[in-house]
Amino acid sequence: MATIPWVGLRPQRPERLGHPWVFAGEIGEVSRDASDGDIVRVSDSRGRLLGMALLNTQSKITLRYLSWFEQDIDADWWTNQLMTAIDRRRRLPEADRTDAIRLINGEADGLPGLIVDRYAGVLVVQMLALGLEPWREVIVETLAGLEYAESIWERSDVHVRELEGLEQRTGLMAGVEPPALVEVFERRARLLVDVREGQKTGMFVDQRRNRMAAAAYANDCRVLNCFSYSGGFAVHAALAGAREVINVDSSGAALELAARNMALNGVADRHRAMETNCFDLLREWSDSDDRLDLVILDPPAFTKSRATIPGALRGYKEINLRAMRLLRRNGILVTCSCSQHIDDQTFRGMLVDAAFDARREIRILEQHGQGPDHPQLPRAPETRYLTCVIAEIE
């Protein structure tokens, strides 16, 4: 094996062992021949091998592990790692229920910083780590070899690229230009996805199972879908028999796409859209005499750091308290958090506090996270970021 650069670590806390990231403060020494973007050999403070990692001294996440033992990380390694992750998705129950699925989930698939979502014949790629750039051509060539890959579109238009010392990028990587909207299916539901400018990579594929779980309670209900974006929860609820679905979002463009999705599924006659701030609407409606059967809360992340957790919890409590007051007796609340710093226990505690202040009783019926195409690493709590609680409110 050719000589490669190396990094030696300072003594690590036991809970950090096996984590796919090494932060700047944990670095002891870096060999002189190491450059940012290199693959390096990592050893602990006693010189014992820990594995192979991507190096970036410009980033707080200085090392991202690729392997836990010494090996050649070459083009064949990248191809094999990519195909192993994609083959893993073929074994999932979702494989024949949708053509909108995450194929590569970064660290959880041993490919740190790489996200690939499939929307029918379009693959949307995010490359979020500097060390991926030398392997860009291999990654694209491997993805282009998939039988369904008509187009590969890059959406590396996120702030984390700048933290890695990289410019944001979007555009065609391979194949033909994707259409403005790509149609996908989730069981019965058909959904239009804006892969070029939509949120994340175009749609929240991590909420697929939660959309279906929520729909199971929607028959003959009046449903309020807050922070609706493109209306995925609403479409599933309407197809399950909801008699009215109200999508609420501050973005007119999102509501327009949601309306198209409702029409695409033949349920436009039961749909109403409201372009407004969800906090304001929940406050106003909860003080009125109107009551709803099912309220869905799927807000964006309220915190990106531990420092802002208290403020985020106040925000979550406010919308959940208002939603509880808005529900009829024994109504259903579907409430979500995608803030990775708010763990399940903290989120449930917030719900208890909200119910107490709303003078309501809460009974949790179901609790879910992201789907199995978004696997989690037990040693990396950051890989579990999504909580979805379905509760009965008395």
Image (cartoon, grey):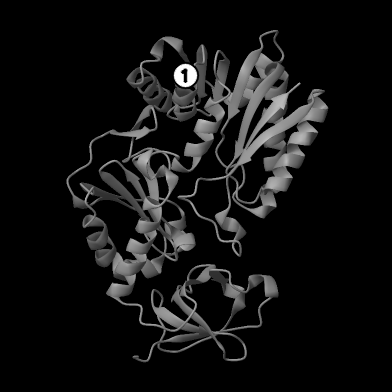
Residue at 73% x, 24% y: name it. 393
Neighbour class for label 1 at 10 Å: few (<14), some, many (≥20)?
many
Q: In which quadrant of the rendered view does residue 361 lie?
A: top right
Q: Position of residue 288 (x, y in %)?
A: 70, 10
Locate the C terminus and report the quarter of the image it occupies: top right
Return the residue at label 1: 238
Extreme residue in the left direction? 176
Q: Residue at x 78, y 35 (%)?
A: 352
Q: Give the number of marks.
A: 1
Residue 375's place in the image compared with 298, above or below, is below
Q: Nearer the viewer, residue 159 or 260?
A: 260
Residue located 66% across and 12% down the image: 291
Decide: is 29 above or below 391.
below
Q: Is residue 193 positioned above or below 379 on the image?
A: above
Where residue 257 sits: x, y (%)?
37, 25
Q: Quadrant of residue 71?
A: bottom left
Assign a secondary structure to mark 1. Answer: helix
- Residue located at (57% from left, 14% from top): 221
Residue 31 x/y as whole percent: 47, 89
Image position of 186 (left or right of 107): left
Q: Reply above or below: 158 against 75.
A: above
Q: Nearer the viewer, residue 153 or 268?
A: 268
Q: Answer with left or right where residue 111 lies relative to residue 169.
A: right
Measuring from the top left, give residue 151's x and y in whole percent: 22, 47
Task: Give amino acid for label 1.
Answer: Ala
Say which quarter of the image contains residue 17: bottom right
Give the quarter of the figure containing the N terminus. Answer: bottom left
